[in-house]
Image: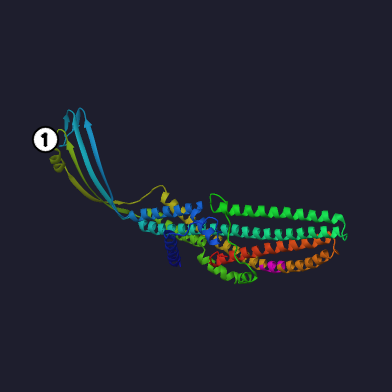
């Protein structure tokens, strides 16, 4: 089971890294062109700071893994020294002589671990798991950005439709104002109806201004989320979201099927599972301190003396040289329970990570169940809102005919128009709520975020 998780994570890591190495199409659309949802998500993923920070953490984890792998190799070092002694000093024959003595030394040494309680192997395995977990964290950050961009994108579409509702309401108010003037001129309506119609038109004009301002703010929020320099000239593509498209989105499946897929494939769940396996290796790494360690060492050294009987630098360098080779066995006996406590802390960290995995899985199940019921309820709400909007339009059509014939008061006309406006706005809200809820469920199902 653990091996399967690791292989799957590493495959995902390789896929993600390959996708990152490939040159993504992150160029912004041409100036003045509308942005699609794919354009927005691609641009945001390339410019988002959090995604870039997560990418740096992947590079850091990769460097840690490289350090663990190369710790198997020998450690090689060299040193050069110079010393001047005044008075009695040691000469090349290791006897004391009076006077000023100058000497130089040159040493090369190497050491290589032969056995360290399997610590290096465990560190490499843990490093691979940590790298795979970091890749999953990066993928989680990319998904969070994608969800946020889709939410803001749908908010723009929602406000665009509200602008359309406000424009239609203003057009009706303007028609009624013209009609009231004509009826008042013919004596079929009192002069006060003209002022009331004008007031209704002014009210709807204000509502349109507010709707357009809300749309501009929604576009600004989306543009800023993309980290664009300016929102000037920014607009998005209006996808087709008719009743047929929405009906196709209502194929929700079952919440249990969605969870079964998500628990095996969602990046944050896989990241926690990988950290759990890494925690198991951390216990083995801590236990390695209980075992003896064996290392191989060797070196070469030579010295140059100013009071030597041998003249010349290179003759002394060759004659005074010496080689050494040896094996060191270090046996731990008592280190004030430091190793014991490190093992205990590693076990505690393992239990803590087990709880983290369990909590992540439970939270995922809760979120998916909520998303499923919310999507199903949102579709029912959308159907009810559509029916209410259709009925309100029919009721207003009758009232408009009465108003055209001069048999309706401005209050009745305004009441019917207000009810129709409210029903249309509620239908638009229900529509985009359902689109958002269904796309969240598709996200858990592993489908791309597209409109």
Q: Position of residue 122 (x, y in %)?
A: 38, 58
Say if 245 sits above or below 236 in the image: below
**Total marks in image:** 1
Which region shows up in magenta?
Answer: 379-385
Residue in the image at 42% along x and 49% along y: 338
Q: Residue at label 1?
A: 309
Residue furthest toward the front? 186
For image coordinates 53% across by 51% down, the residue present is 228
Residue 129: quarter of image: bottom left
Q: Position of residue 435 (x, y in %)?
A: 62, 65
Q: Quadrant of the C terminus?
A: bottom right
- The reply to whether residue 424 is in sight is yes
Determine whether, in the image, residue 422 is placed left or right of residue 13.
right
Residue 336 image offset from top left, x and y in percent: 41, 47
Q: Quadrant of residue 124?
A: bottom left
Position of 292 relative to 424 (above/below)? above
Of 297 and 237, nearer the camera is 237
Q: Secondary structure at mark 1?
A: loop
- 89 relative to 447, above or below: above
Most frequent secondary structure within the magenta stretch: helix
Q: Nearer the viewer, residue 55 or 236?
A: 236
């Amino acid at each position: 089971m653990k091996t399967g998780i690791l292989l799957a994570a590493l495959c995902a890591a390789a896929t993600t890294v390959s996708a990152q190495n490939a040159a993504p199409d992150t160029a912004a659309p041409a100036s003045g062109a509308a942005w699609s949802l794919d354009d927005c998500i691609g641009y945001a993923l390339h410019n988002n700071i959090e995604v870039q920070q997560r990418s740096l953490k992947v590079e850091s984890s990769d460097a840690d893994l490289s350090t663990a792998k190369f710790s198997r190799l020998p450690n090689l070092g060299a040193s050069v020294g110079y010393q001047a002694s005044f008075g009695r000093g040691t000469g090349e024959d290791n006897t004391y002589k009076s006077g000023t003595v100058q000497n130089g030394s040159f040493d090369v040494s190497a050491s290589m671990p032969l056995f360290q309680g399997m610590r290096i192997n465990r560190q490499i395995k843990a490093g691979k798991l940590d790298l795979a977990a970091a890749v999953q964290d990066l993928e989680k950050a990319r998904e969070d950005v994608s969800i946020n961009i889709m939410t803001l994108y749908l908010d723009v579409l929602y406000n665009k439709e509200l602008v359309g509702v406000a424009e239609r309401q203003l057009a009706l108010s303007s028609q009624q104002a013209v009609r009231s003037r004509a009826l008042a001129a013919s004596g079929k309506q009192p002069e006060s109806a003209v002022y009331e119609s004008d007031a209704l038109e002014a009210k709807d004009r204000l509502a349109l201004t507010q709707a357009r301002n809300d749309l501009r703010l929604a576009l600004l929020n989306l543009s800023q989320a993309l980290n664009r320099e300016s929102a000037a000239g920014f607009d998005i593509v209006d996808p087709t979201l008719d009743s047929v498209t929405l009906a196709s989105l209502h194929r929700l499946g079952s919440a249990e099927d969605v969870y079964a897929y998500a628990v095996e494939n969602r990046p944050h769940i896989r990241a926690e599972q990988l950290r759990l396996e890494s925690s198991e290796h951390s216990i083995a790494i801590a236990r390695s301190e209980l075992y003896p360690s064996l290392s191989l060492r060797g070196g070469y050294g030579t010295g140059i003396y100013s009071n030597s009987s041998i003249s010349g630098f290179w003759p002394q360098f060759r004659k005074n040289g010496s080689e050494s080779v040896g094996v060191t066995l270090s046996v731990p006996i008592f280190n004030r329970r430091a190793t014991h406590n490190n093992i205990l802390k590693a076990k505690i960290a393992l239990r803590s990570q087990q709880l983290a995995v369990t909590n992540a899985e439970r939270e995922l199940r809760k979120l998916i169940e909520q998303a499923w019921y919310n999507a199903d309820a949102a579709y029912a709400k959308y159907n009810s809102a559509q029916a209410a909007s259709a009925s309100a339009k029919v009721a207003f059509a009758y009232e408009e005919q009465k108003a055209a014939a001069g048999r309706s008061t401005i209050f009745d006309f305004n009441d019917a128009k207000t009810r129709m406006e409210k029903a249309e706005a509620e239908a638009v809200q229900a529509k985009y709520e359902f689109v958002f809820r269904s796309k969240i469920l598709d996200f858990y199902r592993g489908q791309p975020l597209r409109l």
